[in-house]
Image (cartoon, helix red, strand yellow):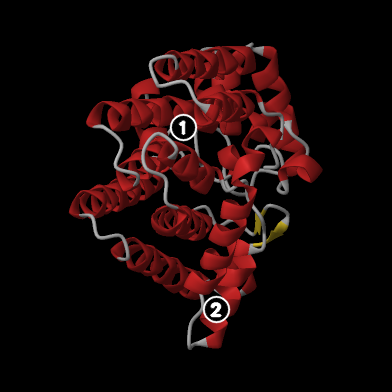
């Protein structure tokens, strides 16, 4: 994610990238290779960016901030490895997943290894509050992964179930990126709490938008076939909303891992016809507006302007 509004962080983000590469090194070369395979697949590095921007509301010290930025990105990476096993996904960002390239078992161990490295990175920050926040976050992320397994092909789930799942799956880690960045910089409790709220709203908007893109993107744009979430049994917001139409609901409920690409394309076309995509965007926008409202209560500085632009990009992005 190359956005000009935080170009002033360029050197610090490069440092974080080097620290990430160093953090995943292992004496067991295959573990290093697999971890590097995921790291080099790219990514927007949203969580490190938010950590650093949040740090600008306190006493910013890159030598402290980098450990938090690395820890949060590593947790995110580990959850992606585990998600690919849960979803039996062979592609991520257009590249083979670790489970596809090696095996399910090796992918699980790699994910666990990356999780452990995140704790090691955070241990370099001598702050018990930060350690407690990170530990609670990992617990909630793991609960989110379990819920994702439990809810697979559960077509009768409620909107509340979906929103709780995406909070744990995505929004919490984005919220905590803002919170821990502010904690590491010694910001006031009021600023820390507001940044957490901002991150939560942005995170909810981000995941809803991500779920929409899965239906409206092409295989080239997504790096995986369109409708992959539904094919893997993940019932996301557009599908939930589209099922208000009984005819479309019947089609959606017929989806299995063996549904053909042609059948999926027909189902996607039906979902689009219901107006579910527009409804989902409307909910994403509501979360985004709440994020902007929180920003207005924060001190004016270059970082606040950057956070506004990052949030706008996240909520309005195409691919």
* Residue with the mark numbered 2: 32
Question: Can residue 228 be spotted in the picture?
Answer: no
In the figure, 13 relative to 151: above or below?
A: below
Q: Please indicate, yes or no, whether residue 55 appears anywhere in the rendered image.
A: yes
Residue at image x 25%, y 47%?
133
Give the structural element (helix, strand or loop) at label 2.
helix
Location of mark 1 (residue): 203
Q: Residues within 10 Å of mark 1 (few under 14, many from 20)?
A: many
Q: Residues within 10 Å of mark 2 (few under 14, many from 20)?
A: some
The residues tagged by marks 2 and 1 sit, at their Cα atoms, a distance apart of: 30 Å
Q: Is residue 1 left or right of residue 236?
A: right
Residue 213 location, quadrant: top right
Quadrant of the image containing the N terminus? top right
Q: Is residue 200 left or right of residue 302?
A: left
Give 110 or 105, whichever is nearer the viewer.
110
| Earlier sequence position, callout 2 versus callout 1 | 2
Q: Position of residue 256 (x, y in %)?
A: 57, 43
Expressed as whole percent of the image width and height from the top left, the position of residue 54 reads 43, 37
| Closer-to-camera residue (17/235) | 17
């Amino acid at each position: 994610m190359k956005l000009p509004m935080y170009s002033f962080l360029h050197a610090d983000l490069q440092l974080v990238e080097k620290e990430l590469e160093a953090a995943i090194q292992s004496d067991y070369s295959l573990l290093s290779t697999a971890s590097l395979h995921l790291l080099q697949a790219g990514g927007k590095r949203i969580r490190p960016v938010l950590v650093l921007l949040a740090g600008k509301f306190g006493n910013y010290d890159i030598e402290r901030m980098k450990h938090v930025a690395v820890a949060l990105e590593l947790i995110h990476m580990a959850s992606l490895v585990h998600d690919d096993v849960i979803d039996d996904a062979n592609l991520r960002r257009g590249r083979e997943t670790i489970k596809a390239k090696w095996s399910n078992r090796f992918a699980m161990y790699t994910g666990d290894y990356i999780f452990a490295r995140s704790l090691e990175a955070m241990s370099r920050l001598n702050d018990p509050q930060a350690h407690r926040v990170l530990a609670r976050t990992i617990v909630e992320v793991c609960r989110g992964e379990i819920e994702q397994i439990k809810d697979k092909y559960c077509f009768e789930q409620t909107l509340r179930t979906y929103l709780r799942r995406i909070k744990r799956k995505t929004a919490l880690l984005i919220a905590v990126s803002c919170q821990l960045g502010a904690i590491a910089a010694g910001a006031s409790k009021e600023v820390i709490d507001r940044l957490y709220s901002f991150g939560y709203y942005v995170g909810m908007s981000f995941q809803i938008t991500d779920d929409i893109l899965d239906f409206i993107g092409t295989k080239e744009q997504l790096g995986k076939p369109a409708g992959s979430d539904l094919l893997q049994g993940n019932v996301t917001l557009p599908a939930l909303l589209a099922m208000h139409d009984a005819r479309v609901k019947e089609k959606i409920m017929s989806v299995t891992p063996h549904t053909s690409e042609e059948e999926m394309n027909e189902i996607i076309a039906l979902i689009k016809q219901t107006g579910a995509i527009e409804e989902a965007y409307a909910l994403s926008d509501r979360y985004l507006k709440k994020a902007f409202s929180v920003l207005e209560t924060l001190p004016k500085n270059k970082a606040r302007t950057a956070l506004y632009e990052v949030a706008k990009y996240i909520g309005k992005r195409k691919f």
